[in-house]
Amino acid sequence: MTNFWDARFAVEEYVYGTEPNSFFKQEIEKLPAGKILMPGEGEGRNAVFAATLGWDVTAFDSSIEGKKKAEKLAESKNVQINYLINNYENIQLPENDFDCIGLVFTHVPLKKRREYHRKYLSSLKPGGHLIMECYSKEQIHNDTGGPRDIDMLFSEEELHTDFESCSKLSIVKEEIYHEEGQFHVGNASVIRIVAEK
């Protein structure tokens, strides 16, 4: 999978654009800046945006090409991010350390999904926030982004189970139109989550 993402990102243009995801932007702007974790951050558009708001950003992805572009984007915005080369399976995260976690289209195999989501929650401080946007299982009928494997798409019920330990949890499925670079364009079925540990 690393080779897939390196190949996708090894072009001059930012294939998902340089602007933050609209839902992530809407929600992160409501919070006071602190420490944020951005898993699967790719070319860095959301991490860099958080940094421009004063957040102390730690991001990770398995793609070295993604890291190069994220750091270039950060430099262009005169901010710094801590971008690690790692993957969902092996990343070691400190307990109760982050004020926020941003999960933007971080799709993983069904058998590992809950494990990864609970790993992220354990690294969130009590009272910390989760912001997540992902594709619903209905997105399999659209050719506007996301995995072509339905087991890597999400349902509201699955995500409620993953994050049921949160003290506050809002999970909403929506039909939207999005335009984020060349691979996220058109009508899409998404699930949007805001939660507090």
Image (spheres, rainbow, N blue to C red):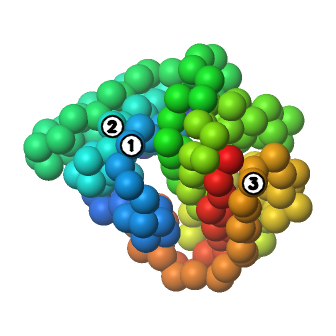
Looking at the rendered image, the quarter that the N terminus falls into is: top right
Q: What element carries label 3?
A: loop
Mark 2, Cα crowd under 10 Å, few <14 / some 14-19 / many 20+, is: many
Estimate the spatial distance between the alpha carbons at disc 1 and disc 2, rounded to whole Å.
Answer: 6 Å
Identity of the amino acid at label 2?
Asp
The residue positioned 82% from the left and 62% from the top of the image is 155
Residue 189 point in image, percent of width and height: 67, 74
Q: Nearer the viewer, residue 22 or 96?
A: 96
Q: Is residue 179 visible?
A: yes
State which tag comes first along the sequence, 3 or 2: 2
Mark 1 and mark 2 residues within 8 Å of each other at the beta carbon:
yes
Q: Which of 172 and 113 is in front in this view?
A: 172
Residue 23 point in image, percent of width and height: 49, 69
The residue positioned 57% from the left and 20% from the top of the image is 94
Residue 43 shown left or right of residue 190 in the figure: left
Identity of the amino acid at label 1?
Gly
Mark 1, Cα crowd under 10 Å, few <14 / some 14-19 / many 20+, is: some
Q: In which quarter of the image is residue 135?
A: bottom right
Q: Nearer the viewer, residue 189 or 124?
A: 124
Q: In the picture shown, does residue 88 fall above or below 164?
A: above
Disc sitting over residue 167 in the figure: 3
State which tag comes first along the sequence, 1 or 2: 1
Residue 186 point in image, percent of width and height: 51, 79
Residue that label 2 marks: 56
Disc sitting over residue 34 in the figure: 1
Mark 3 and mark 2 residues within 8 Å of each other at the beta carbon:
no
State which tag comes first along the sequence, 1 or 3: 1
Q: In the picture shown, does residue 141 fall above or below 157?
A: below
The residue positioned 62% from the left and 23% from the top of the image is 95
Q: Is residue 9 visible?
A: no
